Amino acid sequence: MNDKRIMDIELLRGIAVLGVVFHHLQGSLFRDGLAWLGSVAAYGQFWWGVDLFFAISGFVIARSLVPQLRACTSAAQFWQRTRDFWIRRAFRLLPSAWLWLLLMLLATLFLNCSGAFGSLHWSLSLEEQFYLLLPLLVLLCRKYLAWALLALVLVQILTLRSALLMVIRTDAMALGVLLALWTARGSYRHWEPKWLGRYPGLGPLLLILSCLGLGWLATDGFNVTRYRVGALAVLCALLVWIASYNRDYLLPRGLLKSLLAWVGSRSYGIYLIHVPVFLLVREAWFRLAPLGTTGLNEQPLLAMACAAGLLLLLSELNYRVIELPLRNRGAELVQRLGAARSPVPSTGVTSC
């Protein structure tokens, strides 16, 4: 399976992370909240960006990993490829996560006059557990993997989500994996939504309506169904399905798409960094303005501009200095381990 990045998937990553960033403006950047943000939240919330991330992760990881694992001819080869996958994921995810966790802890201790850094919240564990468990699921379920995933999705969709179950939701990830498995079948091409390409304005309209619909489903006042989280997972998976063909169905190529795809390529850093940046701006405002966060609320556009500039700068630095170099280090380590276990060609000379 081709591991090349899909621009339409990067587009969805960009939309997902922007939704999460916007969702955290209220409470993280503006501690006391803004009236207009509260009004927006009453009609549409954007925490569904996390579910879209989950669906994307399930698809992107499974489309390359599952075929590799299924092609293994021995248990040793299976565990070698699983180990290589875990090494690449660790080098990809953990250095940035640990760096920003450490910086948040240091800010809590030494840069916290306003109390902005008084609490620490981190939410990467579910995705990291998925990376650990997916190879084991492939091993245990074998040819029944799709059925096991489908059962997992149905159980969650038909279950009323409590606060605890919201934390462990995996239906969007499972749907992403199912989509990746489907790409190996002929029916995947048969069901390609080519009709979106025949009407250029239809894809962007569908994308906008989907985002609005996801936002509406995510609101606390949505009472049409008790199973809104499952509905969110299905809608996110449908967007990933359309994007998986990489035919510009959702948005034509242009400046807007390039910008969103750039944001998508930096989405991991933006996801990690945006809350620390919001808290840092609050702390700086407290030190520079006697009114503290009240002064920040009186100049929301300036505060958001400062936060956006700092977030873009730090996420680009994180991408260039941390993510790319260590991702390459992980790939090099996997190559060295592969070379070390390759048999040495015989030279015809025996040693004593």
Image (cartoon, helix red, strand yellow):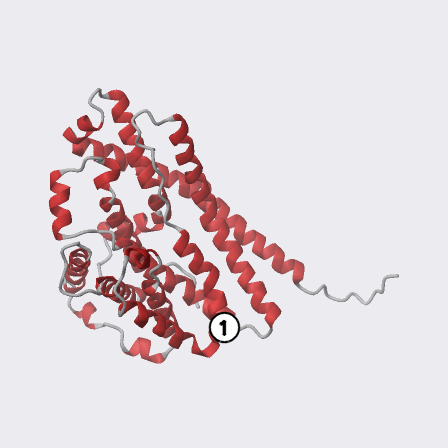
Q: Locate the C terminus by quadrant.
A: bottom right
Rendered location of residue 143, percent (x, y): 46, 78
The answer to whether residue 7 is visible is no
Using the image as rendered, state which of residue 56 and residue 194 is in the foreground: 56
**Residue at image x 72%, y 63%?**
344
**Residue at image x 13%, y 47%?**
40
Relative to 36, residue 192 above or below: below
Rendered location of residue 57, percent (x, y): 37, 59
Relative to 125, residue 70 above or below: below
Total labels: the figure holds 1
The answer to whether residue 85 is visible is yes
Classify mark 1: helix, strand or loop: helix
**Residue at image x 35%, y 47%?**
266
Using the image as rendered, state which of residue 6 and residue 118 is in the foreground: 118
Q: Amino acid at mark 1?
A: Leu
Rendered location of residue 119, percent (x, y): 34, 37
- Asked if residue 263 lies left or right of residue 223, the reply is right
Q: Give the residue number, with chain letter if any, for mark 1.
A: 140
- Asked if residue 37 lies left or right of residue 232, the reply is left
Rendered location of residue 206, percent (x, y): 17, 63
